[in-house]
Amino acid sequence: MKKLILFELRKVFSKRLALIALIGIILFSALLSFSTFQNKYAFDPNIGEGTGKTAVEIDKEIAAKYEGILTDEKVQQMMSDFAPTSDLHGLSAIYVYQNAMQSAAFSRFSDKEGNWNGLSVSDVFGNEEIKIGYVDGWLSTSKNMVRFFIALALAVIIMLAPIFSGEYEGVDNIILTSKYGKTKCTTAKVAAGILTAILTTALVAAFNLLLALIFYGTEGLDCSILFAPSDYVEGFISFNITCGTLLKYQILLAFTCTLSVTGITLFLSAISKNQIVALVAAIAIFLFPVLLPITEANPLFRLVGLLPIYHALAISLLSVEQMSNGMLYAIWAIPAALLFLGVGAGISRRVFAKHQVS
């Protein structure tokens, strides 16, 4: 059986389109991550101004000055240190960006003129204890990962669509005509499909984490995502979790997404005689839910949000609810993925067992 699984894995990864898709994701990840890093900007009158690596160093130096638990005293200090020194010409100070820490402070505690708006830490964050530090790099990584993992799910579909529906030649026909050929060959294909999803997800996740570590270091992984630059104030996760926890959830959801997609693709590949039909159908099923007029505020999203596309669009699913045990509602993606994978793998095995060998 081990040889059959390796044989099926070689078939998956030897296809030109599959290799192009996988290499394309790696290149896309590298280019977007580098572009995001290079476009970083920071300014401080006492430190200087810069982009890219210099901006990250400036932001880290500023963050080190205030890092720790956010207090009203720190807010007052930041409002004083970052107060506008020139005429804003009607532009609201809330949206003025000098550096990541200034943007985080002004987006929550500033009025239009750049003065303190009167709010305390408890007014903004309730009873939550907010640990602050350099989080901008990791939050940028998180935003980029949404794009990477959607592309990854599409790549997995491309890799696995032909696994049953493709035409079999040579060794496949010999295996299928043997006494246990259909059972063993089908099991090997399912196992190869699951391994393909796991290996590619692990590769893409590890590659992106490595790039993030190179660009931003480990600072900020234990800091709250709530005290972040203005880009993350609206439409982001509203729960007091750390950057490290956010990334753990996203990587978990990347695996549940690709495993769910694997189950769907195996099923469609088994029932389709044409691999193009299986490919198009799998992509359509994967992408269709985003067209539904259902938002995170809709109670139906608790069910719709467990569809594979929302595992990749992690921010939407992670915004649903924080349960009493501290876990986010997104943890239900695990049983959802096992259901998709189990049903898809089980039906595909039965359907393919009836495959007629010419």
Image: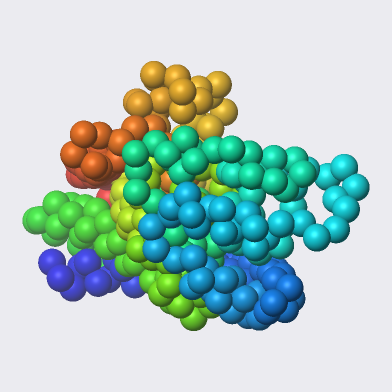
Q: Is residue 269 visible?
A: no
Above/below status of 2 relative to 272: below
Q: Quadrant of residue 248?
A: bottom left
In-image side of 218 versus 34 (left or right): left
Above/below status of 328 relative to 178: above
Name, please, the residue furthest toward the right.
Answer: 89
Q: Count every numbered label the image shows and give the total.
A: 0
Residue at the (54%, 74%) spot, across then down:
60
Q: Quadrant of residue 350?
A: top left
Residue at the (13%, 66%) spot, across then down:
1
Above/below status of 230 relative to 4: above
Name, please, the residue furthest toward the left.
Answer: 179
Residue at the (69%, 46%) spot, across then down:
115
Depth check, front residue: 166 or 128 = 128
In-image side of 53 versus 217 (left or right): right
Q: Where residue 304 appears, x then y in whole percent?
A: 40, 27
Q: How is the image coloured?
A: rainbow
Q: Where residue 22 appears, x then y in whole percent?
A: 49, 67
Q: Is residue 61 visible?
A: yes
In-image side of 32 versus 87 (left or right): left
Depth check, front residue: 44 or 50 = 44
Q: Where residue 230 appears, x then y in whole percent?
A: 62, 49
Residue at the (37%, 46%) spot, across then down:
240
Q: Quadrant of residue 198?
A: bottom left
Name, please, the residue furthest toward the top.
Answer: 299
Q: Where residue 16 appears, x then y in whole percent?
A: 52, 69
